[in-house]
Amino acid sequence: MSASTMVLPLRRPNGMRVLDLCCGAGGLSMGYYLAGFDVTGIDIHPMPNYPFAFHQADALEYLDRIITTGEVEEYELIHASWPCQNKARVTAWRGSRDDHPDLITPGKRLMQASGRPWALENVPEAAWDGTLRADYLLCGTQFGLNVRRHRAFETSWAGGGDLLPPCWHHKGLLAFQHKGERAYADAMGCTWMNKTEARQAVPPAYTEWIADQYLTHEAEAAA
């Protein structure tokens, strides 16, 4: 287990824990942290800049193991960003979709078997082909960020909650072709990452908002 030495922003803890599978360098983990959660990240690759508790492991195997042992009960919420290369549009650096396995389907199956509330993030193409249900479709411009970064979220509570303004794809917006630039990482709010890490990252604002939807749903269900 390891964590970077970055100074974390202030927040109000809520006493809950979230497990972030395929966490990368922690863009979405940071959103949950800002919403009050304590975060543990899992990724198959070393993530020296990840700012929270971290285990290097295969996420599918890790989740399967903690379901079997009952350790999954330690978490109020499970999040996963299963690799998207099997669904995302073909690019020169990503190669053919057929070169990559579909990890969303077995990953979602395990999340459903966990018995815990969960949120699954991926590219919109995964919703277009029916691999996941787009309970929420988010873009950076909806949060006042200068980035065009669409992501679909399927959740165990099936959406609902607050309404966001529509996307605003204005001139000068930092889009996909800017992903390798320092300015793109900063515009997303992922200032602790290097440019390579930021290519795969998603803005923390997305999961800070998703966490609020989860907490609202839980409060309404308990009322």
Image (spheres, rainbow, N blue to C red):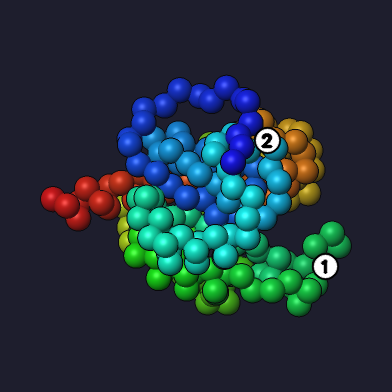
Depth check: give the residue in front, 217 or 83.
83
Residue lying at 43% horizontally and 38% vertically, measured from the top left: 38
- Residue 206: x and y in percent read 50, 45
Q: Secondary structure at mark 2?
A: loop
Residue lying at 71% horizontally and 51% vertically, measured from the top left: 45
Q: Secondary structure at mark 1?
A: loop
Decide if residue 33 is on the left or right side of residue 45.
left
- Residue 31: x and y in percent read 49, 40
Residue lying at 58% horizontally and 77% vertically, measured from the top left: 129
Q: Residues within 10 Å of mark 1 (few under 14, many from 20)?
A: few
Residue receiving disc 1: 95
Decide if residue 188 is on the left or right side of residue 89.
left
Depth check: give the residue in front, 74 or 35.
74
Between the C-alphas of marks 1 and 2, the distance is: 27 Å
Depth check: give the residue in front, 95 or 69.
69
Q: Amino acid at mark 2?
A: Asn
Question: Mark 1 against mark 2, which lies toward the viewer?
Answer: 2
Q: Amino acid at mark 1?
A: Gly
Residue receiving disc 2: 49
Residue 11's place in the image compared with 28, above or below, is above
